[in-house]
Amino acid sequence: MPKLVRLYVQSVALGFVISAGFTAGLIWVDVAGIGHLILGSDIGWIAVAMLVVFNGIVFSAVQFAFRVMAMAEGDEGPKGGHGDLVPVKATAGSAKS
């Protein structure tokens, strides 16, 4: 399996694990009464499944983006002329309100 595909699969798996933990936390803490609604309904499992799937998609994408951006090589130093600062003198009457 190519390295990038393996990285993607690992990111998706980790994203869905994080999503399941996040959804469990939402239900446990009962944020905005969502835990009471889910546990009090006979079809609350559909809401749990939807929360896990949709949050899993988001968390997987964020995890994959984070891992790809972490692969970047470091810069050698600042670029764009930040090394030469020009001193500026302020006069007493220059600031008017």
Image (spheres, rainbow, N blue to C red):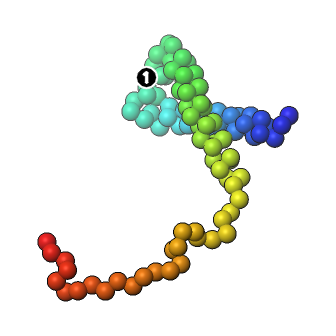
Mark 1, other Cα within 10 Å: few <14 / some 14–19 / many ≥20: some
Task: Please identify the quarter of the rendering in which residue 91 is found.
Answer: bottom left
Instruction: Pick the residue in front: 28 or 77.
Output: 77
The image quadrant where one finds the N terminus is top right
Q: Position of residue 85 (x, y in %)?
A: 46, 80
Helix, strand, or loop for circle 1? helix
Please name the residue shown 42% across and 82% down the image.
Answer: 86
Left or right of residue 30: residue 12 = right
Q: Looking at the image, can residue 11 be seen?
A: yes
Task: Please identify the quarter of the rendering in which residue 59 is found.
Answer: top right
User: Against 64, is 32 above or below?
Assistant: above
Please name the residue shown 64% across and 33% down the image.
Answer: 16
Q: Position of residue 52 (x, y in %)?
A: 58, 28
Q: Looking at the image, can residue 17 be seen?
A: no
User: Label 1 belongs to which residue?
Assistant: 37
Q: Can you name the residue that lies furthest to the top here? A: 42
Task: Please identify the quarter of the rendering in which residue 88 is found.
Answer: bottom left
